[in-house]
Amino acid sequence: MKNAFNSGAIIGVLSGLWIFIMHMIGVSTKPSHEFNPIELTSGFIPLLGLYFGVRNYREKDLAGQISFLEALMESFKILIVGGVIAVFFAILYIDYVAAGTITDFSGQIFGALLLGLLFSLLVSLLLMNKHKNL
């Protein structure tokens, strides 16, 4: 669980800081129909955090052998920790900077959840190397 907490904390803090950085460079974080390509860079934070977190778990805790299910469970743990921290930053942003409500950002939160689940599957498939016999 220590690995999941560390990796999740890194994802959460970097995602939270990214919200404020986007605001400071003038990119609107409010939902709109205008697409800004720099918004895609925020997806690299959970992808890289999950990849290095699960890889570290495989190498340090499991002696280099991990199954798909073990990798998926570790990914979910990392995402839960990271998500809680990122939502905390998002609430601070909404309350003190953007002056909106959480419902204004519910679509973005759902999108982040969906992206995290897809990244979990991708990372688990990339890093698994132990197959369980049925």
Image: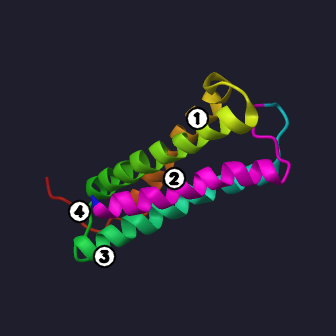
Which disc is residue 48 wearing? none
Q: Disc 3 residue type?
A: Glu
Position of the N terminus, as image quadrant, is: bottom left
Q: For mark 2, what is the residue?
A: 12
Image x and y of residue 103, in percent: 63, 22
Cβ atoms under marks 2 and 1 closer than 8 Å: no
Q: For mark 4, what is the residue?
A: 131
Pointer 4 or 2: first along the chain: 2
For numbered disc 4, what is the local secondary structure?
Answer: loop
Report the residue that reaches farthest toward the front.
Answer: 96
Q: Disc 1 residue type?
A: Ile
Pointer 4 or 3: first along the chain: 3
Q: For mark 1, what is the residue?
A: 109
Q: For mark 3, what is the residue?
A: 59
Image x and y of residue 45, in percent: 58, 58
Is residue 134 one of those drawn in magenta? no
